[in-house]
Amino acid sequence: MYFGFRAGANYNTINVINRYSLIKPTNNLNEGLYNKQYQEVNNLGVIYGITYMYQFEQRLVLGTNASVSRVRFQYLQEQPGTSNSVNFTHNHGLNYLDLPVFFRFMFRKVNSRFWDRKGRKPSVPAIIPFAQAGINFSLLLNANKEYTKYTIQNGIESQEFNKNEDIKSIMAPFKADAFVGVGARFRVNTFYITAEANFRYGLSNANNQNARYANENLQNEAYDVMDDINFQTVEALIGIIFPLKYLSKKEFMPVEI
């Protein structure tokens, strides 16, 4: 059994399931002008927490984590006009409690667990690569939106307002993801350093469909309602893990992760 800590960064992109808007053009050909334009900047977040793993044998590990992840994303929305146009910038920050369950496969030679005739313990590689896959369940802790209104007239842009809004009530309280990843374990004396990179794919809607029109401030001031979306996330983490129990008899080698 192993216990440890992990931290790193994540980068999020948005997969749009269904689009929604309060404003519709008179000409259906121009409907795309009012769609939210999801950006690929300002989408970098952080993740940190604890990890627990149980090793069945030298190659197979079952693990779980309890982590706080910060998810950020941004979209722009334009309302074009003949003499002037109005642009809105929407920045979102969401904090989740992540509770994944995963299997990890260690790419290593399986050694005999018996010491040899000369009293030497079988060698364990100092560096072992691994692959992993699992399911992640997330609980929304809090959610915030910062929205800014800009007016452009005669080529001159001016900011009208910048506001913040609590949007936890219009986001889904839970979400689920599937993920796969690769990494390596490095032995340092009696503990281990791990480095891993994972790709998460959202399996559920990140917003609350039943509360889409519940926030009147966003509708009245920014003409904004959320699309149906889920997240696709790449994350990179560094961890430190400590063994909680070793087999202590001389004729057996410790089961090492």
Image (cartoon, grey):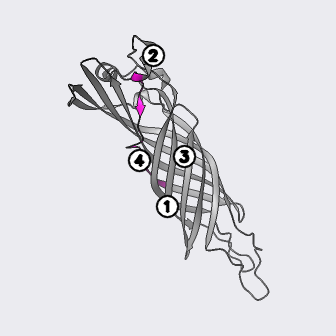
- Mark 1–mark 4 Cα distance, whole angstroms, equals 17 Å
Q: Who's the residue at 42% across and 18% down the image?
A: 30
Label 2 with label 4: CB-CB less than 8 Å:
no
Q: Which of marks 3 and 2 is nearer the N terminus?
A: 2
Rendered view: 93 above or below 118: above
Judging by the rendered image, the residue that carries numbered circle 1 is 238
- Mark 4–mark 3 Cα distance, whole angstroms, equals 20 Å
- Residue 151 part of the magenta segment: no
Residue 83 in the figure: left or right of residue 196: left
In the picture as drawn, the residue positioned furthest to the right comes out as: 117
Q: Which of marks 1 and 4 is nearer the N terminus?
A: 4
Judging by the rendered image, the residue that carries numbered circle 3 is 99
Judging by the rendered image, the residue that carries numbered circle 2 is 29
> Is 225 or 120 nearer to us in this picture?
225
- Mark 1–mark 2 Cα distance, whole angstroms, equals 49 Å
- Mark 2–mark 4 Cα distance, whole angstroms, equals 34 Å
- Label 1 vs label 4, nearer the camera: 4
Judging by the rendered image, the residue that carries numbered circle 4 is 44
Label 3 with label 1: CB-CB less than 8 Å:
no
**SS at mark 2 in the image:** helix
- Residue 40 part of the magenta segment: yes
Residue 86 in the figure: left or right of residue 156: right
Q: Who's the residue at 54% across and 46% down the image?
A: 99
Label 1 with label 2: CB-CB less than 8 Å:
no
- Mark 3–mark 2 Cα distance, whole angstroms, equals 44 Å
The magenta stretch is: 33-49
Q: Earlier in the sequence, mark 4 or mark 3?
A: 4
